[in-house]
Image: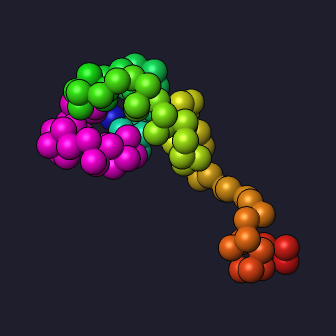
Amino acid sequence: MGNTAEVVKANLKKYGNDTSRLIDIIRDVQSELGSVSDEAVGLIADGAGLSRVDVEGVVSFYHFFSKKPVGKYAVYLNNSAVSVMMGCGA
């Protein structure tokens, strides 16, 4: 695990600063750092040529991204139509 700037830079390079790969970049940054901090959001935005709001919007929209460190495993429960059809009530 490197520092935030190194991790972000490496992942931007890995995906060629391609903004269509933003979710992949954020996912890999979170995987390596344990979360997507405000610092990481800013560095990703700067490196990809996006606004902070664009990156923050992706981080806050998807439930699997976290601004704070989380545990090794995450359990997500929901009662969506698909979950109900697949037996979540049981």
Q: Is residue 79 left or right of residue 6?
A: right
63 lies left or right of 39: right
* Quarter of image, res 88: bottom right
> Is the magenta region chiefly helix, strand or loop?
helix
Q: From the viewer's perspective, tell me whether residue 83 is left or right of residue 22.
A: right
Between 67 and 57, the residue placed more toward the observer is 57
Number of marks present in the image shown? 0
In the figure, 77 relative to 38: above or below? Answer: below
On the image, which quarter does residue 49 sit in?
top left
Residue at (71% x, 80% y) in the render: 86
Q: Which residues are magenta?
A: 5-27
Residue 49 seen from this side:
yes
Q: Position of residue 74 (x, y in %)?
A: 62, 52
In the rendered image, residue 8 lying in the magenta stretch gets the answer: yes
Q: Is residue 6 visible?
A: no
**Residue at 28% across / 32% down in the picture?**
7
Q: Position of residue 59 (x, y in %)?
A: 48, 37
Vertical arrangement, residue 20 with respect to residue 33, above or below: below
Q: Residue at x 32, y 43 (%)?
A: 22
Judge whether residue 20 is colored magenta.
yes
**Which quadrant: the N terminus?**
top left
Where residue 63 sits: x, y (%)?
59, 47
Counting from the top left corner in percent of width and height, residue 33 is at: 41, 35
Q: Quadrant of the C terminus?
A: bottom right
Question: Residue 69, located in which quarter of the rendered image?
Answer: top right
